[in-house]
Amino acid sequence: MDYAIASQPYPEQNWGKSAPYTAGKDHNSDNNLMEILQQMHSSLEPRTVFASYGKSLGQLLPIQGVQLNHQLKLNWGRCHGLNQQRVISGFGEPYSIKYYLSSPLTPDQLIQLNEIEKLFCQPFLNATKYSQMSNQAMFDALTGLGNRYYYRQSIKSALARANRNQGDISLVVLDLDNFKSVNDQHGHKLGDTILSSFAELINDAIRNTDQAFRIGGDEFIIIAQGNALEMTPLCQRIINTMESHPLMSTFQVKCSLGVASSSGAQTQDKLYESADMALYEAKDAGRNCFRICND
């Protein structure tokens, strides 16, 4: 399956995979247009739809690359050299699209390009809307972190990998200290800013292999690779960063953390309960600290 990519040219090893333009081909064939339309409607992934569009153009016209100036910034093929820029208005708002050519388009070829552009708009718009809906279903709108639904899917997969002896999995449950009083006293706007800032702080602290989620209110979760003892540097890093963070230190918002590791065929609910118990131990110990479950 071909994919378009964002922000950089299509990989060089994929150049020339599309069949070359052939002068003797029947370009206005309804069968060709129907096949192109079916290919683009076969996916709800925007990059795949765009790649299908580029591949179809490469087979029918002297087009070797396509660049869409959309919010996704998609490229397909060899995006350099002779080019022609056009405007597509079938997405609800106009976007520019640039075609990179091996030779100038003839008037007949421009007519065919118009026909194929019209076919591209609807499947790409459908895929874009579906992608946005999928993201809204899995990510918290305020912080951009995964939501409760995405967390439950992710921890299930992480535990399955751990049960296949592919490494330890730890759960870190985080709760903001003094957040409720700040939120009540200064309003939800400041509270939302604190939550967003804390999400950024967590993202900066975790590794690329870890995942962070906001599962409700001021409660956050990290799914991390490694056992509970290996979470000590991560937890301490978050606590230290909270103390030096301008917004958090100004309003005395701190953080308590509880850590638990998976063991055997442990369920996701049991793992969460263990980490949550460790969190309450941290709060009982005076807050602004972390505790590791000893199970």
Image: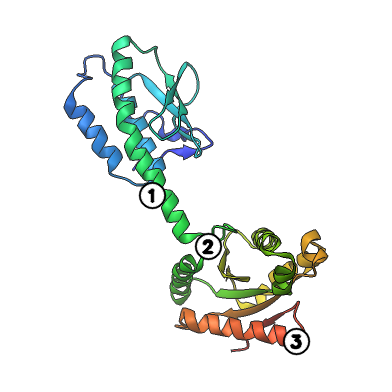
Q: Counting residues from the N terminus, which is met first, the one under dot 2 or under dot 3?
A: 2
Label annotation for residue 285: 3
Determine the CA span between mark 2 and mark 3. 29 Å
Report the front residue among 270 and 62: 270
Image spot of residue 93 (x, y percent)? 45, 33
Residue 167 horizontal side relative to residue 32, left or right: right
Q: Is residue 40 visible?
A: yes
Image spot of residue 87 (x, y percent)? 44, 24
In the rendered view, tell whether residue 185 sits above or below residue 137.
Answer: below
Image spot of residue 143 (x, y percent)? 60, 59
Determine the CA span between mark 1 and mark 2. 18 Å
Q: Counting residues from the N terminus, which is met first, the one under dot 1 or under dot 3?
A: 1
Give, as a three-letter code, the residue at label 1.
Answer: Tyr
Q: Would you name the residue on which mark 2 appears?
A: 146
Q: Report if the CB atoms under discs 1 and 2 are less than 8 Å apart.
A: no
> Residue sitting at 18 percent across and 23 percent down?
29
> Residue sitting at 78 percent across and 61 percent down?
247
> Residue sitting at 17 percent across and 29 percent down?
31
In the rendered view, tell whether residue 22 sits above or below residue 165.
Answer: above
User: Mark 1 packing: few (<14 Cα in 10 Å), some, or many (20+)?
Assistant: some
Q: Report if the CB atoms under discs 2 and 3 are less than 8 Å apart.
A: no
Give, as a three-letter code, the residue at label 2.
Answer: Gly
Determine the CA span between mark 1 and mark 3. 46 Å
> Residue sitting at 40 percent across and 42 percent down?
46
Give, as a three-letter code, the residue at label 3.
Answer: Ala
Report the front residue among 108 and 265: 108
In the rendered view, tell whether residue 286 sits above or below residue 220.
Answer: below
User: Mark 2 packing: few (<14 Cα in 10 Å), some, or many (20+)?
Assistant: many
Under circle 1, the secondary element is helix
